[in-house]
Image (tube, grey):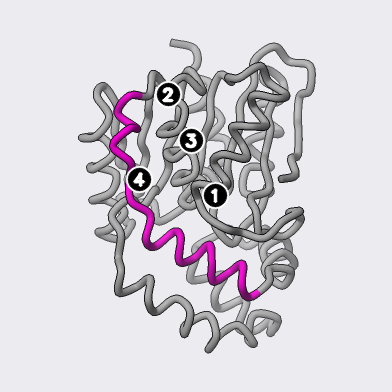
Amino acid sequence: MKYKEYGAGRPETIMLLHGGGLSWWNYREAAETLQSVYHVILPILDGHAGSDRPFTTIEDNAAEIISFIDRELKGAVTLIGGLSLGAQILLEMLSQRNDLCRCALIESAAVIPSKLTGALIGPSVSASFGLIRNKTFAKMQFRSLRIKPELFGDYFRDTCEIAKPDMTAFLKANTVYRLKSSVRDSTAEMHIFAGEKENRRILRSAEAVREAVPGSRLTILPGLYHGEFSINHPDKYAETVKNILSK
C-alpha cells in the first residue's frame, strides 16, 4: 500500500482513509489544513489509482494498514478517519486491534449487508465499465455523486485507472460488509457521522454502529448527501477533527 503524507515531523499522527472509487485527494484539502498541527497520512487503498496491489478484501486492507502503523508509527496513532469504504476498513481495523487510535471518525459506513445488491455488482460493472473513459458519461456519474465540480479532473483521471476486477471487488466488498462484534472492544473514542440526505441503509448502519460501540457518538449532518462532509466541506471536516482532539 502507498501513502501520501503531510506535516511530517509533527508529534501527533492522523490517518484518513478515502472512499471507494476515489483516492487520496478525497482528503487533500483537509490534510493541507491539518498539517500545520498534525502529521497527516493518506493511504491509497488497494485496487485504486496509484495503489501498488489489487483489491482483495476489506479485512486484508485493514491488516495492511495495521502492519504499517506497527512498523512506522509504533503501533498507534492519535486519530483515524474514513469515508464509506474507508470507514468500513477503519471499523475492521478497530475490530482487529482495540487500541489502535485514541479517536475514530466514521463517515457514511455501510455495515448492513445487501446480498442482492452484492450479486448484481458484477453484471452492473460489466455493463457500464466500457463507458468509464467516456467523459460525457463520467460527468453524469460525477454529478450523481454530488462531488464539488473542481474535483472532476482528479475523479476522471483516477477512475480511468481502476481495473475492472478491482472495481468489481471493492464495490462488492462495500455492499456485503458486516460489522464485527469485536468492534465493541475498541478503546477509541468513536464519532459517527452520516448525512441527513443519505440512503436508508447508511442511516440505519450509522445507528447500528452507535448501538454496537458503547459510548460512541452519532451526528446526523443536516442537508448533506453521501461523502459531502469530508469531500465538499474540508474546512468544516478539519475543524471537527481539531475539536475532537482538543477535548
Q: Position of residue 38 (x, y in %)?
A: 67, 20
Q: Say if mark 4 contacts mark 2, CB within 8 Å.
A: no
Res. 194 mark: 4
Residue in the foreground of this view, choosing between 206 and 58: 58
Q: Say which amino acid is labelled 3.
A: Met
Name which residue lies at 20% across and 35% down.
Answer: 211
| Mark with earlier residue (4, 3) | 3
Query: Is disc 2 placed on a helix, strand or loop?
Result: loop
Q: Nearer the viewer, mark 2 or mark 1?
A: 2
Q: For marks 1 and 4, give the CA distance.
A: 14 Å
Q: Crowdedness of circle 2 by 10 Å Cα count: few (<14), some, many (20+)?
A: some
Q: Nearer the viewer, mark 1 or mark 4?
A: 4
Residue for badge 3: 93
Residue for badge 2: 98
Q: Say if mark 3 contacts mark 2, CB within 8 Å.
A: no
- The boundaries of the magenta stretch are 164-185
177 inside magenta stretch = yes
Q: Say which amino acid is labelled 2.
A: Asn
Q: Is residue 207 above or below residue 145?
A: above
